[in-house]
Image (spheres, rainbow, N blue to C red):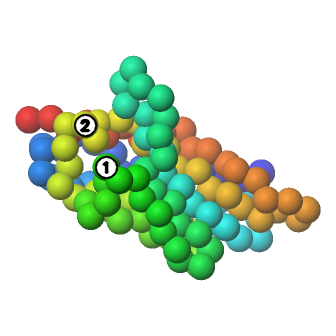
C-alpha cells in the first residue's frame, strides 16, 4: 500500500514564497515521475510541474521562472518551491507520484494542500 502526503501549504502575501513537500511511503521499488497539480476555486485541475526519473522537468507556462520542482529518491519525497506567488496561484495543490510496483507503474494521489495568496 502506497501513501502520498503533501504539506507546506498556507496563507502568503503576494510576492512571497512557499515550499510544498510530498512524502511517498509504503511498498514500491521507486518513483518514476512526480507531478504537482493544482485546482483553483471553481476551475479544473491543471498540471503545474513534473519531474521524471532522469531529472527532466516540465512546467506550466504560468509558473515558469517562479516555481521549481525537485525530488529526492533516497527520501522518497518531492518538493515544489514557489517564489513570486500571485493571487492567481491560489489553489489546492496535489502531488501525484507514479511509482514502480512489482508488475506495473501506478499513479498515487495525495489529499492536497491549500495555498492561498492574498494581502
Which of these two is toward me, 90 or 111? Answer: 90
Query: Which residue does the image show at 39% across and 20% down from the upper left?
Result: 42
Residue 83 picture location, percent across and down: 22, 58
Among the two numbered marks 1 and 2 on one chain, the one whose residue lies closer to the N terminus: 1
Asked if disc 1 and disc 2 are in contact, CB closer than 8 Å, the reply is yes
Examine the rendered structure and indicate whether residue 43 appears above or below residue 9.
above
Name the residue at 62% across, 56% down.
97
Task: Give the image location of residue 80, x and y in percent.
Answer: 39, 60
Q: Which mark is residue 62?
A: 1
Q: Look at the numbered disc 1 and give the secondary structure of its residue.
A: loop
* Marks 1/2: CA–CA distance: 10 Å
Could you say where residue 105 lies in the image, as x and y percent from the top left?
Answer: 79, 59
Q: Which residue is mark 2?
A: 88
Could you tell me if residue 78 is visible in this image?
Answer: no
- Image point 71% across, 70% down: which residue? 30
- Given the current orientation, which residue lies at the most extreme front position? 61
Q: In this image, 89 relative to 23: left or right?
A: left
Mark identifier at residue 113:
none
Amino acid at each position: 500500500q502506497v501513501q502520498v502526503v503533501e504539506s507546506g501549504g498556507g496563507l502568503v502575501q503576494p510576492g512571497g514564497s512557499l515550499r510544498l513537500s510530498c512524502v511517498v511511503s509504503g511498498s514500491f521499488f521507486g518513483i518514476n515521475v512526480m507531478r504537482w497539480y493544482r485546482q483553483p476555486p471553481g476551475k479544473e485541475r491543471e498540471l503545474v510541474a513534473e519531474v521524471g526519473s532522469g531529472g527532466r522537468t516540465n512546467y506550466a507556462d504560468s509558473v515558469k521562472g517562479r516555481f521549481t520542482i525537485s525530488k529526492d529518491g533516497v527520501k522518497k519525497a518531492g518538493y515544489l518551491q514557489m517564489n513570486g506567488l500571485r493571487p492567481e496561484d491560489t489553489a489546492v495543490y496535489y502531488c501525484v507520484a507514479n511509482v514502480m510496483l512489482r508488475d506495473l507503474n501506478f499513479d498515487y494521489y495525495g489529499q492536497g494542500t491549500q495555498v492561498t495568496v492574498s494581502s
